Image (cartoon, coloured by chain):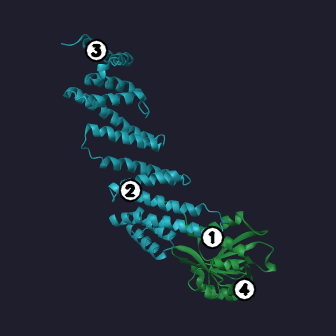
Amino acid sequence: MQNFDTNAKIKAVFLYNFTRYFEWPEGKKTGNFIIHMVGKNEALLKELNKMAESKMVGNQKMEVINTPTFDGKSKPHMLFILPDASKSLNDIVAKMKGKGALIIAEKEGAAKTGAAINFVVIDNKQKFEYSKTSAVKAGLKTSEDFKALAIAID
Amino acid sequence: MLSSNAFAQLDKLERVQECLKAKDAVCAKQSIDSVFLAKEAYTDAQAQYMRAFVYYELAKKDKYNIQSAFRDTSINAAKISLKLKPDAGIRDGDLVIIKKHSELYYNMCIKYLYDSLNYERSSASYKNYKQLYLMVDSSFNFQAKDIEYYSAVGSHFSDLFNANNTKTEFGENGKIALMKVLELDPKNVSANINLGIIYYNQGVNLINSMDIDTPLDKLEAIQDNSVKLFKQSLPFMTKVYQLDPKNVKALESLRQIYQALNDDAKKEEFNKKLLDARGGSDK
């Protein structure tokens, strides 16, 4: 039996897709495109690093950071709060307001409490909830096409 | 009284026997072929038996070649001889020849499977084995032999598919053979495990092989298909677990399948059972 974490690969594909549907503020269009993963998921980290080696976001190189907690120093474009770090979600949302970071979580109700995107499982498949309000508050521009692909919260 | 023709035929059959005693197959073939220049030979059970015997000897050199004109001639001659209702001695001789051909076909089906990976020929050889063996023992129950053969096919192709997941035809061959095993023996642990693994691995392959820039609508379709395959894998592993709740392979597999199905509660349940089965160790 293959020892392969299918969920990690699927999430990595989702994350790469998210880079296509959002526009980050001008100040974040130079330098590396930073994906900061808070919490522990080795399989996902491996997939994201593989993605960063082969893909770009526009003309920005991708850089993956993984820490157990978030101190706000990394200035990420995407901030993925994993379930084991989700207790700090509210604090992180408050800290990152208007700073041009797409906050992604994987916790029941997270899209209603500040995360722009929240992974959920429906019919054994990974899907995502989307809060346009949270994305706008974070300083991001989005397209209506994206809303159609998500479970829209607002 | 025998006619002069009949005397001549007897002489030729004796000549065949002399050639066989001398282990001269070419001479035996020439002699038996000359016997069959006469029309009467075709309705003579003994002549047909001799022909079957000579061509059996000649077919030995074609051992693992499924297409052997010598073998076909030998089998046909033995069949005709039997139809002519010969005496017990010749009948037994015909059956011995047919049984030997049958055994050779069985060996051939295994050889085609493992050596040249030619499932078509392996399967044709197995069918020939069964057809011929039924002539030797019309009441023979092939169930155990079918299970043995299809288990060998199933596990061989399943191993090959698991080693190289791009060879999808290996997975499909494995599935068909293992399904046959389960039709005959639904509680067969090895067939259930191998089938469960094939379905699971097919689901994993769909995800593993997708590009990182797969669009979201396509990702949805891939997830649909992989979930179907993971769900198809479940009943086989569950069956093994029901038969043997401490089966480590089944417990490991169920843990992985539920993880792939995003069912954390079930994944954790089988993780605990796996730890118990291993006596508390996570290795």
For the point 28% across and 40% down, which residue is it? Answer: B134
Q: Which residue is label 3 attached to?
A: B9
Q: Position of residue A69 (x, y in %)?
A: 64, 80
Q: Nearer the viewer, mark 4 or mark 2?
A: 4
Q: Chain of mark 1?
A: B
Residue A136 visible in image: yes
Which of the chains is cyan? B
Q: Is residue B262 left or right of residue A135?
A: left
Residue B283 visible in image: no
Q: Which residue is label 4 attached to?
A: A136
Three-letter amino acid code at the position of disc 2: Ser
Three-letter amino acid code at the position of disc 1: Asp
Q: Is residue B45 left or right of residue A113?
A: left
Mark 4 touches mark 1? (CB < 8 Å): no
Q: Nearer the viewer, mark 3 or mark 2?
A: 3
Depth check, front residue: B176 or B245:
B176
Q: In the rendered view of the protein, which quadrant contains the N terminus of chain B?
A: top left
Q: Nearer the viewer, mark 4 or mark 3?
A: 3
Q: Which residue is label 1 attached to?
A: B217
Q: Residues within 10 Å of mark 1 (few under 14, many from 20)?
A: few
Marks 4 and 1, Cα distance to the nearest angstrom? Answer: 24 Å
Q: Is residue B4 left or right of residue B219?
A: left
Mark 1 touches mark 2? (CB < 8 Å): no
Of the two numbered discs 1 and 2 on the same chain, state the one appearing first in sequence: 2
